[in-house]
Each structure stands twice: as structure tokens, then as C-alpha cells.
Image (tube, rainbow, N blue to C red):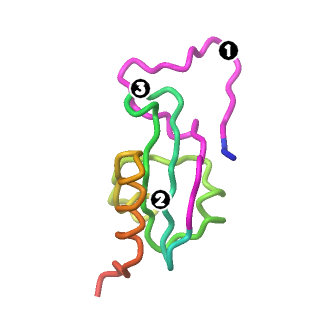
Amino acid sequence: MGVMKLFSGGWDGVTKNNTPDMSLFYIVRNEQVGKNVIAEIRYPHCKNFDGRKILVYLNMTIDKLWDQKELDPHFCVLESAVSPFARFEPTPAGWEAAKYIAQFDWTEK
């Protein structure tokens, strides 16, 4: 399963600076953990870890994640942006660490 935006033209799938294209991604897998979501997302033009990233989103639902037209794997302080709370290496250990972090309520009190 995944989401991918397709472009026509001469794009060869590689960017010069290896920065993820926020509008070109696949959601490889995701899991709801309480009020939070863990997602493995693949950015096909990135080289490290085959473009895969494991991200934790706070106060997110799977439906809301799938509705996103762009997903930036970098942290952002803008309230209007969908920004990950944590990022882990895309390995089985990284997925388990993400599940551990996602189980807590990180709402600021």
C-alpha cells in the first residue's frame, strides 16, 4: 500500500541535494498507537536507507495522515504544518522504538 504523486516530464527521480520531495512519497505501513500514529514512509528519490523513514506523529489519526498531500519528514514549529514528533532509522529496532515512544501522551501540560 502506498501513496505516490506522479509527474510527467523528464524528472529522473533524483534531486541534487537528496532533500525529500514532500509531495512524492509512499506510506509503506502505519499503526495507530493511542492518539498517535507511527508511519514508515518512503521518499523514492532519497538515497539513505532507500528513502525510508519511520516517523511518529502526535494527535494524529491514520485517516488524517493518508489525507496529506505533502509530508515533510523534517521537524517544523509551524502550527499549520503536519510535523513529526520523532524520527527513527527504518529498521525493526527503529519501529519498536517508535511504538514505545508513541504509547505516551506527550501533550504539553
Q: Position of residue 97 (x, y in %)?
A: 35, 62
Please report the residue visible at 66 percent of the width from the left and 38 percent of the height from the top: 4
Residue 82: mark: 2
Q: Residues within 10 Å of mark 2 (few under 14, many from 20)?
A: many
Q: Position of residue 15 (x, y in %)?
A: 45, 21
- Residue 84 colored magenta? no
Question: What residue type is disc 3 on?
Answer: Lys
Q: Is residue 101 above or below residue 22?
A: below
The image quadrant of residue 77 is: bottom left
Secondary structure, mark 3, is: loop
Q: Which residue is mark 1?
A: 9
Q: Which residue is mark 3?
A: 47
| Residue numbers of the magenta segment | 4-31
- Residue 12 colored magenta? yes
Question: What residue type is disc 2 on?
Answer: Val
Earlier sequence position, callout 3 versus callout 1: 1
Q: Position of residue 72 (x, y in %)?
A: 45, 46
Please report the residue visible at 46 percent of the width from the left and 31 percent of the height from the top: 50
Label 1 and label 2: CA atoms lie apart by 29 Å
Q: Position of residue 30 (x, y in %)?
A: 57, 58
Earlier sequence position, callout 3 versus callout 2: 3
